[in-house]
Image (tube, helix red, strand yellow):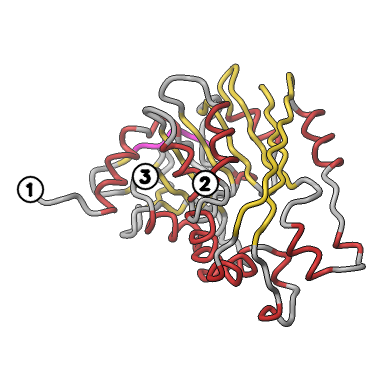
Amino acid sequence: MGLLSKRAQSIQQLQQSIEIFACPLCKQQMTMSDEGKMSCPSNHSFDVAKQGYIYLLSRPIQSMYSKELFESRHEVIQSGIYDNVQQVIAGEINVQHPIILDTGCGEGSHLHRICQKLEGAMGIGVDISKEGIMAAAKFYEDQLWCVGDLANSPYNEASFDCILNILSPANYEEFKRLLKPGGKVIKVVPQENYLKELRVQAFADSEKENYTNEQTVARFKASFNNVDVKRVTYTIPLKPNLVQKLLEMTPMGWHIEQKENIDLQHITIDLDILIGMR
């Protein structure tokens, strides 16, 4: 027997995890057929794509992010510049065989690399960007990838041991609904020196040269109990071929007209990891 196609493998994974999924239209429990159709008792149905992801949006949403952006992000993350951050996150997930939801997962590299560090972890990535989820399904077969919107979530309550929210917008009320009792939300936000070398060259002497995350941290602390904040900061060499990729993947780079003039020999990663309990 030959290897399973990406679609067939995803169908099997979804069948094994179907209790997590709720219809985004009516919130009823879903079932998963052998043919790859996820449906609810009201006959709302969604098909697993041939690339191995499932589209669970209740209405089309236009994303500003392109295929090229996600491919650049994949190369940058796969280079290892976020390894220390991913290691700290994995160390905070201390349950056996955790079920992890990555919200705003993009092309999936953070979730994949974190799951690799955890025995028996099951990762589910969700993003409103079809381009991002298509890239995730292309790069990583071991996780489940869903095009979905947390404002109209396709998951049942109390389904996840951990919710990741890495450099992405949050929906704290939905996070609390989706977490198991005692579960954790782990949110990653920039600190003042994040990508400072790029910020200095691109926005010297402007208000964008400086950054503060105080409001974001305060809102997180108001939303969860037993909040811990861990700062991870280091400077790492940046390979020349990754400079333009970094500019393509970060919103800072979008506003730079003469990208070829940016010269980065190294880059600073400076992030706060916020850990909150339900």
Check disc 2 and give the amino acid type: His
In this view, 213 is above or below 231: below
Q: Nearer the viewer, residue 271 or 97?
A: 271
Is 114 situated left or right of 208 in this image?
A: left
Spatial CA distance of label 3 from label 2 is: 27 Å
**Residue 135 rendering spot, x and y as whole percentages:** 44, 60
Q: As displayed, is residue 189 above or below residue 185? A: below
Element assignment for label 1: loop
Mark 1 → mark 2, Cα distance in angstroms: 32 Å
Closest to the observer: 24 or 197? 197
Coordinates of residue 45 in the picture (x, y in percent): 40, 49
Q: Helix, strand, or loop for circle 3?
A: strand
Q: Amino acid at mark 1?
A: Met
Give above or below for 229 relative to 55. above
Residue topped by disc 1 = 1
Among the two numbered marks 3 and 2 on one chain, the one whose residue lies closer to the N terminus? 3
Instruction: Please name the residue that numbered disc 2 is placed on.
Output: 110
Query: What residue do we see at 34% from left, 59% from top?
Result: 51
Residue at the (77%, 33%) spot, across then down: 220
Marks 1/3: CA–CA distance: 26 Å
Residue stretch rendered in magenta on the structure: 27-31
Q: Position of residue 29 (x, y in %)?
A: 44, 33
Near mark 1 (Cα within 10 A), the count class, few <14, some 14-19 or many ≥20, is few
The residue lying at 61 percent from left, 44 percent from top is 150
Tag 2 or tag 1, which sits nearer the N-term?
Answer: 1
Q: Which residue is mark 3?
A: 38
